[in-house]
Amino acid sequence: MSSVVACRVMLAAGLILALSSPLHAQERDQAPGGDPATEEGVPGEEEAPDAPPPANLECHGDAVEGSGQGFLSSQEASEDAAIAAWLEKAKKQDPLTTWESAGKADLSCVKQGLFSKCFAIGVPCHLR
């Protein structure tokens, strides 16, 4: 029986060493919420304040979001679909708007396997 106990003690010691290894500490530090510098309110990364649109742009209304229809097999097609959906909604606020002149424009995509779906968000603006 003493050899079984000794084996268990050695396994427990090995587990403790493995969990306290530098590699495990690195994984722990990279886990969400593991780095205090990435927490909100901690100085370090500064966010840009909401700047007014450039002087040559005239913006109308609130931000508009477009996402296209479902997940597509091409990310480029998904981006185009999101921009087209955004443009359709944005032109109701400003008929002269384009994606290139949108204020605070942001295009983000999510992937599910080989498919992606994109979301376009921006304030309808046009050149003066």
Image: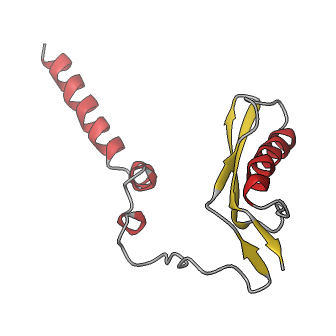
Residue 33 appears left or right of 54: left
Q: Position of residue 126 (x, y in %)?
A: 81, 70
Percent coordinates x, y for residue 106 in the rendering: 69, 59
- The residue at the point 73 percent across, 83 percent down is 54
Q: Position of residue 77 (x, y in %)?
A: 86, 39
Q: Which residue is found at the position 69% from the left and 67% from the top?
A: 60
Q: Residue furthest bottom?
A: 55
Image height of 30 relative to 84, above or below: below
Using the image as rendered, state which of residue 117 and residue 126 is in the foreground: 126
Task: Find residue 70 and report its image quarter.
Answer: top right
Tell me: 40 left or right of 90. Answer: left
Q: Residue at x 76, y 37 (%)?
A: 68
Count of marks, rendered view: 0
Furthest residue in direction top, as rendered? 1
Q: Looking at the picture, does residue 77 appear above or below residue 87? A: above
Q: Quadrant of residue 98?
A: bottom right
Residue 67 placement, left or right of 5: right
- Quarter placement of the N terminus: top left
Q: Quadrant of the C terminus?
A: bottom right
Above or below 37: residue 88: above
Q: How is the image coloured?
A: secondary structure
17 on left or right of 81: left
